[in-house]
Image: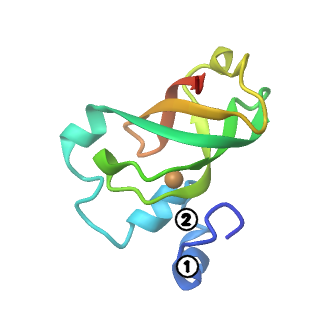
Amino acid sequence: MKKAPHIIPAIVLLSLPLFTSAHADDMGGMPGMHANKQAAMASHKGQGTVNKVDAAAGTVNLTHDPIKSLGWMGMTMDFKMKSKANLDKIKVGMKVNFEVTKEPDGTFVITTITPLK
Ligand SMILES: [Cu+2]
């Protein structure tokens, strides 16, 4: 709930024990959104603001704008980083550009993240 306050609470409550990613939750009720292979392979560009950086875990919490190529609405969520090294220059409060891809296990991973200029 804290990560994605706009998700319908009933869905969050039902889904939290089963999924760790906010998108696994909110897309569970929208079959087809993330199901096509093109979306799984592609890199999707997003923009957002950094709320939290966990360099040790290699995760970042972002409030991101809608990402049309994924059918995502804007939300606040945790992302795993493809490489922890990408977090070197990322600080809390920064506006960032990022690219996200879907891993075979269904999680969304940030491949690049750069401060907005
Ligand atoms: Cu999201």
Q: Is the residue indicated by label 2 positioned so its CB lies within 8 Å of ligand 1? A: no
What residue type is disc 1 on? Leu
What residue type is disc 2 on? Leu
* Residue 102 seen from this side: no
State the mark number for residue 101: none
Q: Determine whether the residue tagged by mark 1 lies in a helix, strand or loop.
A: helix
How far across and down, in percent of the image, does residue 21 sit? 55, 54
Q: Determine whether the residue tagged by mark 2 lies in a helix, strand or loop.
A: loop
Neighbour tally class for label 1: few under 14, some 14-19, many 20 plus, Cα within 10 Å: few
Query: Residue 7 falls in which quadrant of the image?
Result: bottom right
Above or below — where is 46 with respect to 19?
Answer: above
Residue at left offset 26%, top offset 66%: 31
* Residue 15 seen from this side: yes
Of 50 and 53, nearer the camera is 50
How far across and down, in percent of the image, does residue 89 sit? 72, 18
Neighbour tally class for label 2: few under 14, some 14-19, many 20 plus, Cα within 10 Å: few
Q: Quadrant of the C terminus?
A: top right
Q: CA distance from mark 1 to mark 2?
A: 8 Å
Q: Quadrant of the N terminus?
A: bottom right
Query: Residue 71 falls in which quadrant of the image?
Result: bottom left
Query: Residue 90 falls in which quadrant of the image?
Result: top right
Residue at left offset 55%, top offset 65%: 18
Above or below — where is 33 with respect to 5?
Answer: above
Residue at left offset 72%, top offset 66%: 2
Residue at left offset 39%, top offset 48%: 67
Marks 1 and 2 close (CB-CB < 8 Å) = yes
Write down the residue under mark 1: 14
Write down the residue under mark 2: 18
